[in-house]
Amino acid sequence: MPGKLKAKIVAGRHLPVMDRASDLTDAFVEVKFGNTTFKTDVFPKSLNPQWNSEWFKFEVDDEDLQDEPLQITVLDHDTYSANDAIGKVYIDIDPLLSCEAATVISGWLPIYDTIHGIRGEINVLVKVDLFNDLNRFRQSSCGVKFFCTTSIPRCYRVALVHGFVEELVVNEDPEYQWIDRIRTPRASNEARQRLISLMSGELQRKIGLKVLEMGGNAVVGYLQCFDLEGESGLVVRAIGTACTLDKLSPGTAPNTTTHTNTHTLPNTAPTSNACNSPSKDSKEPVFSEDPPHSLSGPPTPLRTLPSSSPPPFSPSKPCSRQSSSSDTDLSLTPRIGKTSPASSPSPPLSAPFLIPTQKLTVLFILLSQFIEFPIFTLTCFPPGFLVHVGGVVSTRSVKLLDRIHNPVLGNTRSYKLLDWNSVAADEPETRDAWWEEIRQEIKSHAKALGCHAVVGYSESTSICEEVCILSASGTAAMLNPRFMREGCLDTGGSDHRFEDASPPSCGFVHIPYDEFNMPFPAQLTYCYHCRRQKVPDVLFTTIDLPAEAEVTGKGCLIQARLCRTKKKAQGEVNATSISNLLPFMEYELHTQLMNKLKLRSMNALFGLRIQISVGENMLLGLASATGVYLSALPAPGGIQIAGKTPSDLSYDQHISTMQKRIDDTIAKNKELYNIHPPECIEEVVGSPIPDRQRSSRLFRSTSESSDELSELDLSHGKKDAFVLEIDDTDAVEDIQSLLTDAPIPAGFYSCNTEVMPGIHNWTSGLQMFTSVRVYRLSNANLTNQGLNKIFTDLCENLLKSLYFKLRSMIPCCLCHLNFTVAVPEEELIQVRGHTYLSTPLLLWSGENEEQLQFSMELCGESTISNNQPTAKPSAPSVDYGSFADRCSTWLELLRLKAHTIRRGSVKTSRRTQLLAHSGIANQQPVSLPCGAPVTVVKMTPLSFLPGTRIVKYLGIINMFFIRETTSLREEGGVSGFLHSFIAEVFAMVRAHVAALGGNALVSYSMKECVFMENPNKNQAQCLINVSGDAVIFIRESDQEAIPPLLTSRQTSSTGADGTT
Amino acid sequence: MSVELDVFVVNTTIMDEEVYQLWLDGYTVNDAVKVRMEGGVLEGCEASAEVLHSDTMDQYRTFQMCERLLHSPVKLANQLLFQIPPHRQVMLIERYYAFDSVFVREVLGKKLSKGTKKDLDDVSAKTGVTLKSCRRQFDNFKRVFKVVEELKGPLVENIRQHFLLSDKLARDYAAIVFFANNRFETGKKKLHYLTFQDFAFCAGQLISNWTVGALGDYNMVEDMDVDLEKEFLQDLKELKILITDRDLLDQHKSLVCTALRGKTKAFNEMEANFKNLSRGLVNIAAKLTNTKEVRDFFIDLVEKFIEPCRSDKWTAGDMRLYLTHYTNSAHVLDTFKHQVVWDRYMGVIKSCILKMYHD
């Protein structure tokens, strides 16, 4: 069934001079969609033409609407010779296909040329009339919403999480087609841009179809990647998590207000994701299952202990839950209940909690019935979703790219995608099989960790010539099945069985595996928070810090960097040598991370991302994560240094000075990150495997390296002290590098997760930046150590550079600090290596110190057990003694929640005022007399904007640009070229967001930034792929502010519900 | 190991005003790094010179990319390439169009031609302003000149609208355009003691009193503020009667002397020089129909009036007193019929001389 696409060309401005004689341009526009082309009249002799065209109408299949971009070409009319192209604009129609996203694309869009960059702007209007297609066998999937955000989008509630979706399309790379030899670089670049645009459209449509099959209506955590495999083609692949999302009605929007702040206040989090039934104005979070029961069922003893259910709720709220839609949901429950008796709403009184093994099996059955790959790309979850976290699972596989087939070489028929199923079934199949294999392996790792699901999952590749490393990593976890199954979400009864009777702030760290049959050596203790369950001593994860987690002190960015040389080789040999190196690299990266973690006196890593890039003669490994001290985990032991041969005195002395330095650093770091865990009695639970082993949460696919550290008898120090052995220069180097990590300058905080653990007061003054550096290594005969040192210096220098540039903004926090390394191809016989760092990252400028203090005091009593003198004696999280009596603890906790909510609202209002103040300054319209003001568009890699409320998601932005130059020197060399290109990409992204009616791009990421140069020929080429979610946000205005001195419960509840 | 490529791009463009100034002043990256180091920018940061160099490079690149937009500031407001907050835009433009008074003094009144541009290296050597900065300032003058040349309407307002400059800066540019158009001689040694601000003030006076636009009749003629009104210049010839008619001259002198007597120490000199001075001023007026003489307007003022007074050690107060009475007394002369022209002429002359009468 068709849809009607309408486009109108209004005007152009700032066009380049195309006619040297008159210094003017005779511009006209071609509007093309599919195979239909329309033209405007020529607007003679003007750099600011006013076409004001009629509406050009395209009647097309909705399948095409999803695949094809609208292509607008601006040309200069030339009477005697061929018309010269000025530039093009590709418009992705997809956001217009969903009724909840944008309705019109209207605004000034930069006219882009792959050789000249931006050349003026064009004002267009685009609309779509879509006729609903109810055909079951349709090939389109209009209406499925896509989000790059890896959490539940802010103005939606999740009704169901269906699970993993993936798709992959393959095509020949136009750059490598024979025709490329005869066409101009411009034509070749445009062919590529267009093809990738088509492929991403097709990919999205296919994923959409899968989602519809699963019964979902949205993809969250959509991650699309390109593999430029060169000769063997172009792979576009995407993964995501299919969900059913319900839009929050406008009336309930205030809920999200509280929400935008909630990440700072764990206990108020439910309000955020929680959400109301779509049509009703009820303020009741759907996730809190207790109210309906207190209404409908007789209060059971368990009900009186509401904290047993992870999603906390505000007891002060009235139970206004009579929404009809949730009732329908409820009615679905029995049906599902039958399929799996375990989830039937039987009286949950049987046991306060199930023992892990039982729970595991039950959950596993549940999940495996529904989801082929229980893999989730989400990193942030609704409260209660995550039951336990096992640890990081990762898999890498080295493949050789072969050109399996050679179909339709030189086929240029308008780059219409080939139907790969018929023409060349091999290739996508091969790639599919590769990934499938990897996902299976990930799944089996998760199983080995006693987990049934993988969360925070991501995939990546690194390609060098014909070798390709496929990597996947995620976090093994136990999930609460009620999110996966229809109806379960709203039935309170069924899921109590899967909850621990432990407070939500520590439940997720409890081990999911069987303690007597551990998958790897680990040291277990009882949870420092609830004292009921076992926890590991360290926890590594790829997800964001759960909102409900309790953290001591502040977090910080931890990086492990590694460089390994390898011999140059071809084909099979090369692949083998790479795969032989990989486990050692993983092992060393892991050791580095562990050391650095201990050095900072922390015990958990979040957002772990290990990237291994392959080059011709080296492998680079870069692991980044955010370290935190989880209050529920045991305090990390120190680091002990031991010499292998304690022979002479000077050597001992050397070791002891080193030891002292390390101890000093640890002490200093404790101060720096404000880590002062409450001292309490240590009760180490003997683990069946001897201690002192490296207890790794990283479960490697290649497991040969688990116990390489020799055992040492440590008569001194704490039992769980981490031992570094100095037996050769390597170890000395390691320790040196451990200690030489430059400390972060005062006033700066950095992390690679969405929110900075331990810091709660964000301002809306944010700044997003991208930095790219390429280094040339001069010496060919570098050793591993030498390379390591260089690589570490590069990373450190980049960070230092950032700190310097942003020095005027302190105190500020670099969030979502994301490093990407690559070793680009080399020309001819090279003796150099490139290191390529790209860091799209973001900065929050914090409030001044005073306010920071103020805010910490406000929420300090509930979230951080910090060492503040003002900490109230009633703070239960500090007073572990009171936990003896569980009931009282719960009550305590309840009270605490009430407190937090109230305080949360107070804080909100407080900040609102500050923001409102700054807002005046920021929102001043452009006061310059001429020209309409340009909409300010914020960009951020985070999924939210602090101090603001996202009111609408307008659709996904996924853009691919190529820029090429043949006058590199004239454009300011490589730096000048790339600088202007990135600036142009930003400009185009902003313009497209603004044209959709948005004022921000969230979850922004620059997924690809491939740079190639040939200085001898004065040429360079660069490819950039960026994506994100276009949104409309509004600032929390003054009107919403509550006077900061509210204490009564009444007001606190309104505060939590949101103020209108 | 060498840095091949080093780029830092922000969504909302960050600009360091200090580095911007260094860039405008024509410092090379290395020199700018040196200046910044000496300025102590690294203090308190654990950053090396390398970091500073990379930061300076980034900023320089940004400025270079912005420069194209700064050439037509109106574009800066609605361009999409850089997201710059409005107050920053204002700063960028204002600083870009700012000029060194030493430099402008050198080119004031010269033809803004290629020839003049070629000589900029001499100007640079003489003034100590870097050649790069000289070129920017010169190009700014030329650009403004070219744009307003073709526009109708009041000069200052046109400059302000097309270049989004502050009132003060727009007035200065109006003066520069006015001087360039009329090619007033400002480079003679005798005029060296005059600053740009002196000239700018005079230009303002001339523009608002002696041009076509000065009549307040805005019929939007081209160059209405740039060219002196022909009719008025013609009328000025009539003033000659003040010196050619002996009676009138004597009468004028006695009137002025009566008014001045006892009010100033320089009375004797005033009395003795009256006829010379009066001849000087009236002759300047009479000659203004000739374009060449217009160019010598300031040098004539200095030679014929300011220098004699200075050698007689008149104070500024004396000058004011003298000019006031000199102007007013002419009204009492029965046979002198050109009161309106006289006032229009003397009003400007008086304020110009008062401005120019200093060491």
Image (tube, helix red, strand yellow):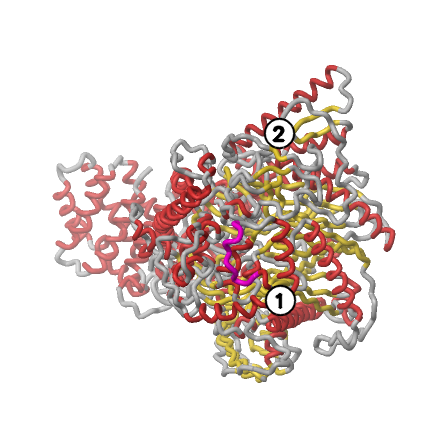
Nearer to the camera, B287 or A357: A357
Nearer to the camera, A818 or A9: A818
Give percent across and percent down for residue B100: 44, 45
What chain letter is assigned to the residue under label 2? A
Query: Residue at left 62%, top 83%?
Result: A36
**Which mark sits nearer the N-terminus, 1 or 2?**
1
Whole-number angstrom distance, CA of label 1 to CA of label 2: 57 Å
Which label number is shown at residue A638? 2
Q: Amino acid at mark 1?
A: Asp
What chain letter is assigned to the residue under label 1? A
Which label number is shown at residue A113? 1
Q: Which residues are magenta?
A: A343-352
Q: Secondary structure at mark 1?
A: strand
Q: Quadrant of the N terminus of chain A?
A: bottom right
Q: Is residue A535 above or below residue A307?
A: above
Query: Residue at left 62%, top 57%?
Result: A362
Q: Is residue A636 above or below residue B150?
A: above
